[in-house]
């Protein structure tokens, strides 16, 4: 064993996959510490089966498995959706916004157990290491952070499987498993394998969740979502809690092939990577919420909020959830949500989410204002003066070009006072 700093007890963010499974004995072998495993149930379904037994068999002294699905949606996914945050136009941030929640609870358990360290299985090439560690630094900087991928000699799946066999770690992984996946209630991501060549179309068998649009039903289906202050509460008139609501929207999205995204994105660490994401229910919610914003937000607020959404997405992607700026931006976003109460009707058809109707008591849209029929509110003759003033800068610039030297004489530089060296 190498000479490592002394660690008494470490809490590991544990998924049950190959990497985190071998980290358990690696921590014990290299740091001589007690290892406690923590797994957050964020909706990864069958991945949780037998997880506690596997962790104990790998050498963990204790295992926490906690259902954080409601907190994930209420405190992370819905606020991100309300901000309209999309990373590089396409990515709905399913992995990005899950990591700070996992790390937050990791810190909680470390404090509860009196641990002096936490560990994660993120690689040294990806974004997740930043997301985990920034959260730990923001919430308890006294905890030591151990990132085995930046320390050990294991360099691939073959090495990892050999290490698992050496220490009798039960794993289901195979050397021929080609995709790196992350799944939760919000999305399913895929990286690696044939996706590493951006010219390759994603193979059909890679999509484990959504129906292909070609095989989706030939008849469209309508769904109505009711929001209260920007929070989705009802589907087709039936009240749903956050988890039940997203489960139902996911089922609809999966059925109609909705939410597939193929993106070459810029990782925070400096390289580009290609990811293919399936976000069925989240895609429906984003479209519905944006439709209600169009109805209820004034122009200046909506346009500024679109800029905020870009910055909000960067903060989430970069792991800066627990920062003063994200908190401040969230205060702005929540203020804009106050009048976002109403219903949105959507048509789902072969991979498309189509706005089919929206209504709200807070609507700023007035049919009597925009009608082409006669009305008493808007005098069309007033538009002439408005256009004259709005276009005045353009007119002045054009007149200077026509009547003068191309620029005003006051803008013409005078070099007569300058002497040559």
Image (cartoon, grey):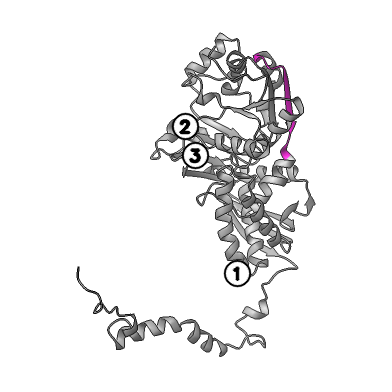
62 lies above or below 192: above
Q: Is residue 404 magenta?
A: no
Left or right of residue 151, residue 194 in this image: left
Determine which residue is flagged by label 2. 192
Number of numbered tags placed on the structure image: 3
Q: Is residue 30 left or right of residue 366?
A: left
Q: Tell me what residue is drawn at x 20 percent, y 68 percent.
A: 421
The 10 Å Cα crowd at callout 2, few under 14, some 14 to 19, many 20 or more, is: some
Q: Quadrant of the N terminus?
A: top right
Residue at the far left: name it.
420
Which segment did they paint magenta? 58-69
Q: Are marks 3 and 1 in contact (CB under 8 Å)?
A: no
Residue at horizontal 66 percent and vertical 86 percent from the top = 377
Residue 187, position in %: x, y? 61, 40
Q: Give the residue pinned by disc 1.
A: 300
Seen in the picture, residue 49 relative to 249 is either above or below; the reply is: above
Give the x, y percent position of residue 226: 74, 56
């Amino acid at each position: 064993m190498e000479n490592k700093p002394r660690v008494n007890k470490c809490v590991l963010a544990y998924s049950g996959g190959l990497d985190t499974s071998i980290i358990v004995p690696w921590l014990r072998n290299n740091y001589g510490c007690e290892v406690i495993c923590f797994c957050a149930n964020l909706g990864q379904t069958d991945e949780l089966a037998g997880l506690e037994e596997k962790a104990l068999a790998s050498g963990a002294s204790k295992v926490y498995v906690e259902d954080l699905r409601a907190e994930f949606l209420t405190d992370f996914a819905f606020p991100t959706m309300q901000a309209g945050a999309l990373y590089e136009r396409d990515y709905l941030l399913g992995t990005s916004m899950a990591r700070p929640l996992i790390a937050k609870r990791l810190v909680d358990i470390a404090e509860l157990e009196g641990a002096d360290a936490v560990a994660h299985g993120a690689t040294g090439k990806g974004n997740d290491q930043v997301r985990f560690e920034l959260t730990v630094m923001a919430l308890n900087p006294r905890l030591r952070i151990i990132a085995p991928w930046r320390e050990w000699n294991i360099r691939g799946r073959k090495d990892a499987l050999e290490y698992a066999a050496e220490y009798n770690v039960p794993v289901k992984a195979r050397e021929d498993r080609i995709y790196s996946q992350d799944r939760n209630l919000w999305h399913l991501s895929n990286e690696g394998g044939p996706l590493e060549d951006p010219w390759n179309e994603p193979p059909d068998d890679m999509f484990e969740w959504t129906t292909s649009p070609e095989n989706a039903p030939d008849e469209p289906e309508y769904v109505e979502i009711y929001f209260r202050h920007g929070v989705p509460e009802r589907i087709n008139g039936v009240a749903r809690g956050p988890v039940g609501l997203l489960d139902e929207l996911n089922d609809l999205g999966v059925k109609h092939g909705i939410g597939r995204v193929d993106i070459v994105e810029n990782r925070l660490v400096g390289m580009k990577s290609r990811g293919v994401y399936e976000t069925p229910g989240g895609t429906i919610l984003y479209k519905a919420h944006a439709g209600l914003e169009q109805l209820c937000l004034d122009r200046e607020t909506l346009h500024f909020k679109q800029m905020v959404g870009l910055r909000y997405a960067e903060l989430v992607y970069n792991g800066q959830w627990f920062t003063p700026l994200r908190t401040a931006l969230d205060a702005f976003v929540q203020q804009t949500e106050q009048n976002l109460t109403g219903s949105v009707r959507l048509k789902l058809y072969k991979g498309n989410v189509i706005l089919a109707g929206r209504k709200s008591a807070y609507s700023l849209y007035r049919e009597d204002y925009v009608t082409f029929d006669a009305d008493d509110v808007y005098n069309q003759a007033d538009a002439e003066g408005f256009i004259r003033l709005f276009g005045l800068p353009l007119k002045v610039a054009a007149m200077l070009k026509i009547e003068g030297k191309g620029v005003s004489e006051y803008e013409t530089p005078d070099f007569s006072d300058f002497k040559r060296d």
